[in-house]
Amino acid sequence: MSYASVEYAKDMLSSPERFAYHTRNFFTRIIVKAAYGLDISADSDDAYIIGIKEVAEGFLEATVPGRFLVDMIPALKYVPGWMPGTKWQRYADHHRKKIYEVKTEPFERVLKATREGRGEPCVLSRIIDTLPPPEDPGRKEEEELACDLGVSSYLGGSDTSVGTVLTLILLMAMHPEVQRRAQAELDRVVGVGRLPTFEDRPNLLYVNAVLRELFRWHQLAPLGLPHATTEDDIYDGYFIPKGTIVVGNIWDMMQNEEMFPNPHVFDPDRHIKNGRINEDTINPIPPSFGFGRRICPGRHLALDSIYLVATTMLAVFDIAPVKDEAGNSTLKCSFGGRLLMVPEPFECIITPRSSRHAEFIRNLEIQ
């Protein structure tokens, strides 16, 4: 991942006003590289990137409650597609074909490269190595699962990770005292001659507390994903029959005043006790990735990527709000979206922490 963090630092130095784009580009490169072994940027004209963006947009649109008439009148699913009120069928058909394209094209690309001995190590290449021979009856199903895994990696990890880092940037602009403490710790542990690495992680107590508080303070998916009970259950006197759709109110858990006093305040210190992470408080990170069998399988990659981009940014850049003529911040803390509650577009000022930091970034080499 180090190549992506170096590129991220250089991009932020050259055009800091495009911080949202650079953040998306960072995660696009990480996810596509991990899944397919391909070096592709977010603005690439590669057919996969163009297609996956359309699929992602279509997926988010389809998750809006009541977006289609069939959401309110389920019986319409039996109506022929040529009848009025069935626009959703054409919408679904289009995106079904598009999903097939974006999940099979990169699979075929990696499969061809693997057969020719020039494939890059990645999740998909490892799966291909374990596939049964072509004549095996189960081969087709295994290939289908491999294709689904690749496209799910981007759909499940891109917007969530980008939204998390944009929330962090917003919070750092709103809380300069938190930013300064995190930077002081990075200076002490890392210094100026290099970027933070995973080896520094155990020694970055306050930075780890900031990331914990980031996940607690705002949940991109406040209710997570729906679950269904696998058997009859009784909870707090309520009978919950098998097959009931249930949701986990993650937002309420993280705003519980008994567990987190003054929950609306962004306070990383709540996660520190006696010079170490306070294990008496609930770690807010795991619930943010879901529960049980539906927990996010890419959570480890996501956390590592978020740690890397967050520490890189804090180590070499200052983040400040835009101010009006009276010197007052124009920054507004506002969230919106469809399936995910992400920060509304905002402006902030991102500059190198010093001329020495700027020179360090310029001299970084992308490997």
Image (tube, grey):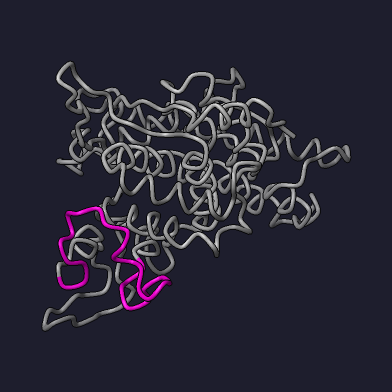
Q: Position of residue 363 (x, y in %)?
A: 69, 28
Q: Residue at x 78, y 53 (%)?
A: 129
Q: Quadrant of residue 180?
A: top left
In the depicted view, which residue is nearer to us: 351 or 12? 351
Q: Is residue 329 left or right of residue 366?
A: left
Q: Position of residue 33 (x, y in %)?
A: 65, 39
Residue 278, magenta (yes or no): yes
What residue occupies the far right of the structure in this picture? Answer: 117
Report whether residue 78 is seen.
no
Figure check: 305 above or below 236: above
Q: Residue at x 35, y 27 (%)?
A: 91
Residue 175, magenta (yes or no): no
Q: Is residue 231 left or right of residue 265?
A: right
- Give the quadrant of the C terminus: top right
Q: Main secondary structure of the magenta part?
A: loop
Q: Residue at x 61, y 43 (%)?
A: 195
In the depicted view, which residue is nearer to us: 299 or 125? 299
- Give the quadrant of the N terminus: top right
In the depicted view, which residue is nearer to us: 322 or 76? 322
Q: Position of residue 206 (x, y in %)?
A: 42, 59
In the depicted view, which residue is nearer to us: 281 or 318? 318
Figure check: 161 above or below 98: below
Q: Quadrant of residue 105?
A: top right
Q: Is residue 351 left or right of residue 91?
A: right
Q: Residue at x 49, y 38 (%)?
A: 313
Q: Position of residue 109 (x, y in %)?
A: 73, 33
For the image, the number of numbered tags is 0
Q: Is residue 325 left or right of residue 123?
A: left
- Stretch of the chain drawn in magenta: 258-283
Report whether residue 178 is seen.
yes
Q: Quadrant of residue 192?
A: top right
Figure check: 288 above or below 97: below
